[in-house]
Amino acid sequence: MVTNKKFEGDFTEVENRFPKLAYSWRAKLKMWLITGELDICDNKGIYWNTFDIGMAVPYNYPYCVPIVIEKSTLIPRDIDWHISEGGICCLDVYHNLIVQSKVGIHICDFILEKVYPFFANQLHRLEGGQYAGKEYAHYFEGIIQYYLEEHKLPDEDSILLLLSHIVTRKRTERNKDCPCGSGTKAKYCHLQSIEIIKKLGEEQINTDIDKIKKRLEN
């Protein structure tokens, strides 16, 4: 049995808030598996429904992105519902999850902020026909949306300029023009976004650059 005092300590909060969830260590997979039922209530505490879920938490917790699977098949198995045929849930645009994992997650907060809202929103759509809040586009369109909305970049050319600056590993001068091409000083523009985007890692940023270049060429 591999022990991770951080995970075990954090999970006590999960047990207090979600008593139907439990975990076990799977040595062959090198991860913790959280399984059980997740009861969903509205903001007034009125019970809506229950999902049978599974979560795979890699051994390098808290610096990881847990995989969440809906086992109860209440959600239609369709990418338009942000779920795969095998029940793997797309909780958020992957770039947001990567950035969060680099900082380190807290398993209870992850469930409260990512997992629970995902399933509550699915019930909202099952009942009313649409999601309650903002929805990300699928595939690479969702990544473009991430840069446009999360980092307030105006277009794909600006995204490319900013990402290309980051991978050159040049220092971003606070009082010089922002590398996004806006003509505004970096400290008033995308200085903070640059530090966040760096957390994606050079490999992911280069992948995004290549895909954006291909889109702009077509």
Image (tube, rainbow, N blue to C red):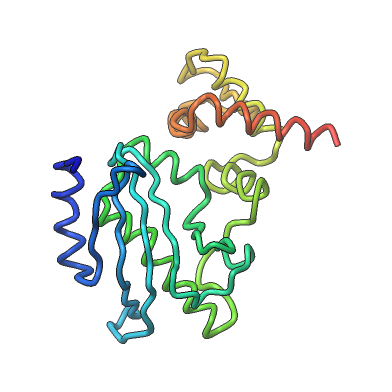
Q: Position of residue 2 (x, y in %)?
A: 20, 40
Q: Position of residue 132 (x, y in %)?
A: 50, 73
Name of the residue lying farthest toward the right: 218
Count of numbered badges drawn on the protein: 0
The relative height of residue 195 versus residue 48 in the rendered view (above or below) is above
Q: Position of residue 194 (x, y in %)?
A: 49, 29
Report the residue at 36% width, 57% height from top.
55
- Quick check: 58 left or right of 186? left
Q: What quarter of the picture does the N terminus occupy?
A: top left
The relative height of residue 2 versus residue 14 in the rendered view (above or below) is above
Report the residue at 52% width, 32% height from top.
189
Q: Nearer the viewer, residue 173 or 27?
A: 27
- Quick check: 189 left or right of 19? right
- Quick check: 181 left or right of 26? right
Q: Nearer the viewer, residue 105 or 67?
A: 67
- Quick check: 110 left or right of 93? left
Report the residue at 44% width, 75% height from top.
72
In the figure, residue 148 lies in which quadrant? Answer: top right
Q: What quarter of the picture does the C terminus occupy?
A: top right
The relative height of residue 26 versus residue 120 in the rendered view (above or below) is above
Q: Position of residue 180 (x, y in %)?
A: 61, 28
